[in-house]
Amino acid sequence: MLLFLSKRLGLLLLTVLATSFIVFAVLELDVDTVAVKVLGGYSTQEQRALWLEENGYNRLFITRYAEWLSNFVQGDFGYSTRFKRPVGDFFWNYLGMTAILAGITMAIVVPLALTFGILSGMKETSLLDRVLSFICIISTSVPEFASVILFSFIFVFTLGILPGTSSMIQGFSWKELVLPVLVLVVYDFGYIARITRASMVEVMHTSYVRTAILKGMPFKRVVTVHALRNALIAPVTAIFLQFPWLLSGVVVVEIAFAYKGIGHLLLEGALYHDISLIEMCTVVAVIVVVLTQLIADIICMFLNPRIRFS
Amino acid sequence: MDTQTPLLEAKNLSIAYSTRSGPLNAVINFNMTLHKGDSIGIVGESGCGKTTVLLALMNYLGKNGIITSGDIFFKGKSLLSMSQQELTDIRGNQISMIYQEPMSALNPCLTIGKQLFEVLAFHSNLSPSEAQERTIETLHDVRLPEPEHIMTCYPHQISGGQQQRIVIAMALLSRPTVLLLDEPTTALDVTVEYGIIKLINSLKQKYGSSMIYISHNMGLIRQTCEDLIVMYSGHAVETGKTKDVFSKPSHPYTQGLLKCIPSPAHEPSERPLSPIKGQLPPANDRPKGCFFGPRCHFFKEGLCDNPNGIPLEKTPFHPNHFSRCARTHELEKLEQPPTPKAATRASSSTQDTHPLLSIQNIKKNYHVQQSLFSSLSSSKTKTIKANNDISLSVYKGQIVSIVGESGCGKTTLAKLILGLEKPSSGSISFDNQNISDLSVRTRDTSLISHLQMIFQNPNETLNPSLSVGYQITRAVRKFNPQLSKKDARKKAFKLFDMVSLSPQIFFNRLPMHLSGGQKQRIGISRAFAGSPSLVIADEPVSALDVSVQSSVIELLHKLQLNENCSLLVISHDLSLVRYLSDFVVVMYLGHIMESGPVRDIFSPPFNPYTEALLAAVPIADVSISKRDDIVLEGNLPSPFNPPKGCPLSSRCHRFIEGLCDTTPPPTQKISDVHSITCHIPIDTLKSQPPIFTTNPNQNNQKETKS
């Protein structure tokens, strides 16, 4: 187990290193574009050359990467041209906001989706299954930008019980969190519920579930003890794949509600060619992807003894 | 409950499966009565409804199974009208079931101990310590070593034979009154199967359980059951005491089935196989009257096609012996179908001096690494010796068989010959050409077409989306690039004729529209597309039903003679080997234990392993009696850690301590062609009695105790 963990952590570092190199290469290999991005399109050739010389851009690419990397590791993430501040000064706040949004969303999605999936998968084609499946498909098929408008219309403009923006200028507010979470939950839970259902249906058809039934186990025990654990293996991977999506894929929701999260930053960074910001966002996104997959694998290992003892 | 009430009774039971194309009658008007201590066997080929009957006896048919008429009574109470709670109380407690594939019948995510305990937790009032005691006792009863350790294991950590014993123990834990067995040994090796059968028989006596045993293997049923029901296409066609049915089979189907099984105790010429023509009718298109009619030699118009069906009638032989045949009473006087002449094989005696295929001291080691990382961190790899010093020759026109349990290295050997793997050392020469280093990709077309293979599972070897005609034509064109499209098609037509499939009917069909036997015929015709001189057949009939097996065996026999090619048959079925081959090689754990002409292998002196293999063969023929004093105990040793000395030493019933476990055995020559690898002197081995003895009179005489 320890060996496995250390191996995987090593692999994680390697992945992060490789992606950081690729990101750095894409953004900073061609130094002229860097100068254009920083100084703007109307700068003269001399200005650019001067700026490049001053900022050490005429050195070898590898040397620059090494310097960038060592700064990065020491906590100097570069200067944001958009926010006119070092990236490290404000990035963590935004990340924290996204973490709150993602965490609350997952805390609602996971139990809800698993319950829906298990209930509809344990008795395939029953009335309960059909009703739950219907709800899941509807919820998944409405895209975020549509539900943003729909929910805003209902809760903000018609009922007037929720605020329409979630920029949290006056400090943290639960009320402002409701709409973004609602939109994300509605969009995401149906998907995981469908995966859970498919996995559950498959498991309910296996011979060992038949064995359990013919052993005279009550149906409740068949589902909770014999089927559930096997059926959870597939959804776990899918659930943990939602984290990267929640980190960077929720641009629409964050923009729509003016929520100050990573998605917001990423869009700003991309629009204003903010190289350091993009680099930071990308590296953090990669770390989150690899880390969540590692957690997913560990959970799968715990669920599936065939992996644990091979 | 008075003694008259049967434990389990099925009355006029009919079961249908609802499908999109309407209901399919899986079981029709089935009757069965099980009293305390009875053992009933149900035999039949796949699709005859035997598993459906078994599941119905637990009232578990899945969503689309419907009992259309009749009822099932357990101790006089209708199972069909019971509540879910009552059913739960009976299942696993009073009626338990032993399943076909133990690996999939056990939950992979729960420890074996947990899976066993819950039976007692729900069905008994035993305290945890009593339950623990009962579990360990039962595990001892099924002869599992170290029960405490096994209970902490997960199913994938133990062998197939052990898994089957766990499934049996699980069924026995609550001391059920009725035990249902669904082909409990199908996935197992012959020797393991034999151990399990002996175990079931002894447990039946110890616990006094009644049992219903379903199988497609007549020999197994004969060894385990007192009563017999033969099923065909949803019907019981013959019922009675097992010994009566086997000694006086009355239904033409039963007779046909028995004639389909090759006998390990007879020369092929003494007991030629006579396949049943045709195939099982689909459940939605059964013939009028007798379902077996179209395949029956005795079919009589106006009698056997009675639209009201044929009733189950008493036979003249025994008051409890019934047969569903309109001609039961005249059947004996009718002329029997002509027994086909066994293919005469003269080739074995007229051997060339030079072998077609010659394998010299082949070794094949597999190096197994744990993972990429461990191979980086340490150079330790484990070695499996899959083939160890194998030498063998195949002459032109000869049929050579390789037998042994799974894991003995027979498939590895086939891969080496075909060039799918490279030998670690040794040489293989084919037609005077050294081919040991030629992988299949570097071999030229003529070599590939001369060295062909027939695969075990015809379902997986045919491309499901191309017509079989196209697939054969393609093989023909690959092997004979000079042929025009038209000529290739002609040749493909000929190949269809050769395997007795009408090209007009079958050429454009997709594999899914063919039965298992027909698919295997296609597989065989593909192997013969390039006029091969050697065909390797890997378990060519093991995936097929009994009645189909024999016709495929006959086909192989015929093709081999007509095409004058050699066959290398890989099989675990010794009856088949006896019937088909000239020369036999017995392998165990990558070693050749014995090799010789087929007659010498099947009579003393035996290598102890051959002896055990032969003793494990289930025999359906009542005229053959078998020694049953040899059981190979234990499991195949781990290939990572084979026994020192003789590979068999850990399981051998003739084990000599201090010799067999330390020194590799010598290869002793009995004759020019027959050799045995064993420490025991030839004279001692020679003094062993034969495994099978035949009483030729018994066929027509009254049966004796089997």
Image: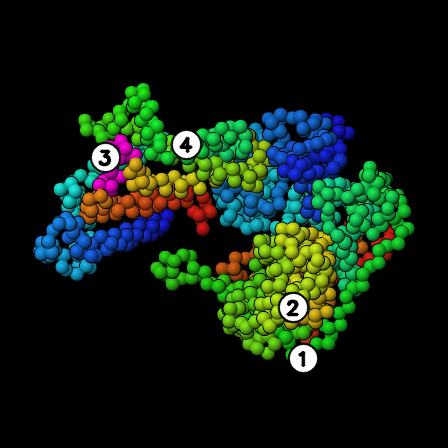
Q: Real-space Cα distance between discs 2 and 1?
A: 37 Å
Q: Which of the two residues, B530 or B585, is positioned nearer the viewer here?
A: B530
Q: Report the residue marked by disc 3.
A: A260
Q: Real-space Cα distance between discs 3 and 4?
A: 25 Å
Q: Real-space Cα distance between discs 3 and 2?
A: 75 Å
- Asked if the residue at tag 1 contacts the one at tag 2, i.e. Cβ–Cβ closer than 8 Å, the answer is no
Q: Secondary structure at mark 2?
A: helix
The residue under label 1 is which amino acid type? Answer: Thr
The residue under label 2 is which amino acid type? Answer: Asp
- Asked if the residue at tag 2 contacts the one at tag 3, i.e. Cβ–Cβ closer than 8 Å, the answer is no
Rendering quarter of residue A255? top left
Q: Where is the N terminus of chain B found, in terms of image quarters?
A: top right
Q: Secondary structure at mark 4?
A: helix
> Which residue lies at the image location 57% right of the left edge and 48% below the top edge?
B162
Q: Which residues are magenta?
A: A253-268
Q: Report the residue marked by disc 4.
A: A139
> Which residue lies at the image location 61% right of the left edge and 73% below the top edge?
B357
Letter of the chain that mark 2 sits on in the rendering: B
Note whether A272 is above or below B430 in the view shown. Answer: above
Letter of the chain that mark 1 sits on in the rendering: B
- Asked if the residue at tag 4 contacts the one at tag 1, i.e. Cβ–Cβ closer than 8 Å, the answer is no
Q: Report the residue marked by disc 1.
A: B353
Relative to residue B76, is residue B465 drawn left or right?
left
Neighbour tally class for label 2: few under 14, some 14-19, many 20 plus, Cα within 10 Å = some
Q: Report the residue marked by disc 2.
A: B487
> Which residue lies at the image location 73% right of the left edge and 65% below the top edge?
B558
Q: Which of the two residues, B88 or B342, is positioned nearer the viewer here?
A: B342
